[in-house]
Image: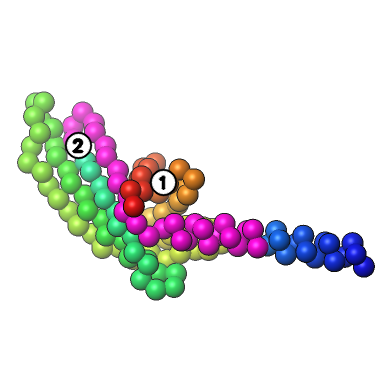
Amino acid sequence: MKATFKSMVGALLLLAACQSKKNQTQDFIPGTYVNSAKGEYAVANDTLVIKQADGYNYQITRRTGYQAIRKGKLLPKHQKVEILNSVWDSNKQELDEVTTGRIFRFDTDKKLLLINQASYQKIN
């Protein structure tokens, strides 16, 4: 009887710990994330602002600034703003962007958002 009780308590504690980690990731999501990239032909800055719309739905505002480099000089800056909708997948622990199918993964320990090979640092 005592062994069964201890097993049940252990299983409940394990389940609670898993749920806590899942909730921790979802609680981490809202905020502002930044990424900068520089290459031989361009400089780009990306800012993502993620807000929880309701429940598992999130709105992502993506602001991208881009400057081409020609003959060693920066050309005028171009800016683009996109509004994206995404859904939290609690089983996979990721945001799935509805239109393009992009997957947003989070590393809460390093305060990072990962999209394919790109890494965005959370700033707030």
Cβ atoms under marks 1 and 2 closer than 8 Å: no
Q: Nearer the viewer, residue 34 or 76?
A: 34
Give the structural element (helix, strand or loop) at label 1.
strand
Describe residue 3's horizontal placement relative to residue 109 as left or right.
Answer: right
Residue drawn at 10 percent across, 43 percent down: 77
Residue 84 visible in rendering: yes
The x and y percentages for residue 79 are 14, 50
Give the structural element (helix, strand or loop) at label 2.
strand
Describe residue 118's horizontal placement relative to residue 41 as left or right.
Answer: right
Residue drawn at 27 percent across, 40 percent down: 36
Q: Residues within 10 Å of mark 2 (few under 14, many from 20)?
A: some
Colour basis: rainbow
Q: Disc 1 versus disc 2: distance between alpha carbons?
A: 21 Å
Q: Quadrant of residue 104?
A: bottom left
Q: Based on the picture, tell me whether residue 25 belongs to the magenta stretch.
A: yes
Describe residue 43's horizontal placement relative to residue 9 as left or right.
Answer: left
State which quarter of the image contains the N terminus: bottom right
The residue most toward the right is 1
Which region is colored magenta?
16-43
For label 1, the residue is 112
The x and y percentages for residue 108 are 47, 49
Q: Amino acid at mark 2?
A: Val
The x and y percentages for residue 6 are 83, 62
Residue drawn at 26 percent across, 63 percent down: 83
Residue drawn at 75 percent across, 62 percent down: 11
For label 2, the residue is 43
Mark toward the start of the polypeptide (1 vs 2): 2
Observer-side mark, 1 or 2, equals: 1
For the image, the number of numbered tags is 2
Residue 98 visible in rendering: no
Q: Nearer the viewer, residue 104 or 2?
A: 2
Q: Amino acid at mark 1?
A: Leu
